[in-house]
Amino acid sequence: MRVDRWFAFVDLSGFTAFTDAEGDEAATAVLSQFRGVVRETATDFTVRIAKWLGDGCMLVSVEPEAVVAAVCRLEQAVDDLQLPLSLHAGCAGGPVILLEGDDYTGRAVNLAARLAAVAPAHEIYAPADLGPYVPDGRHAEPAGMIAVPGFSDPVEVVRFGCGRAAGTVRA
């Protein structure tokens, strides 16, 4: 069945290196805090955690503003928790196939995942059409045309690092 949905893939930057340096117990403690804030945020913004992906997750929403606001809140919350790792994410949306009632496939899912993979720490990447959904008090900055792995044409992308104060140097 074809449906319109909006997706975010969120991930903790540097998790593998952190686990290698600090050990499994420290990694588990970070993941527990991260997953707790993801669950709380998903509830607050009525987005669904579609799946956990180790140190990240896939979120899905029926409204673009909900998924964008939720990811902005998550990025801020990770900073507020002063976790030793920062978040990076990708968002996208549009028509997709709802497969067997609980999974999604299509361009929007793939684009959100690929944008998350290329977004640096403290950044959220999304196609330019999601820029207007950034919450009040935040702004989307053009990131230009980005060659996204697996896509034949570059994508016009905006970035928003909601957890960083203006003027802060990004890591």
Image (spheres, helix red, strand yellow):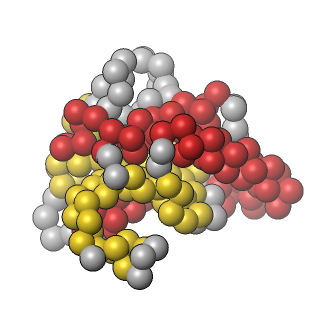
User: Which residue is depicted at the point 34% across and 21% down?
Assistant: 136
- Where 166 falls versus 86 (above or below)? above
Furthest residue toward right: 25
User: Viewed as shown, does residue 119 lie left or right of 22?
Assistant: left
Furthest residue toward left: 153
User: Viewed as shown, does residue 62 lie left or right of 54?
Assistant: left
- Where 84 falls versus 147 (above or below)? above
- The tally of labels here is 0
Find residue 21 and report its horizontal and vertical position in percent.
Answer: 77, 55
Furthest residue toward bottom: 100
Quarter location, residue 115: bottom left
User: Which residue is depicted at the point 49% across and 25% down?
Assistant: 164
- Where 17 falls versus 47 (above or below)? below
Residue 122 seen in render? no
Find residue 23 and report its horizontal and vertical position in percent.
Answer: 83, 58
User: Viewed as shown, does residue 35 lie left or right of 43?
Assistant: right
Find residue 122 and report its horizontal and vertical position in percent.
Answer: 48, 38
User: Which residue is depicted at the point 47% across and 49% down?
Assistant: 47
User: Which residue is depicted at the point 25% across and 60% down?
Assistant: 4
Quarter location, residue 40: top right
Q: Quadrant of the N terminus?
A: bottom left
Residue 134 seen in render? yes
Nearest the viewer among 43 and 86 is 43
User: Viewed as shown, does residue 30 lie left or right of 9?
Assistant: right
Nearest the viewer among 150 and 9 is 9
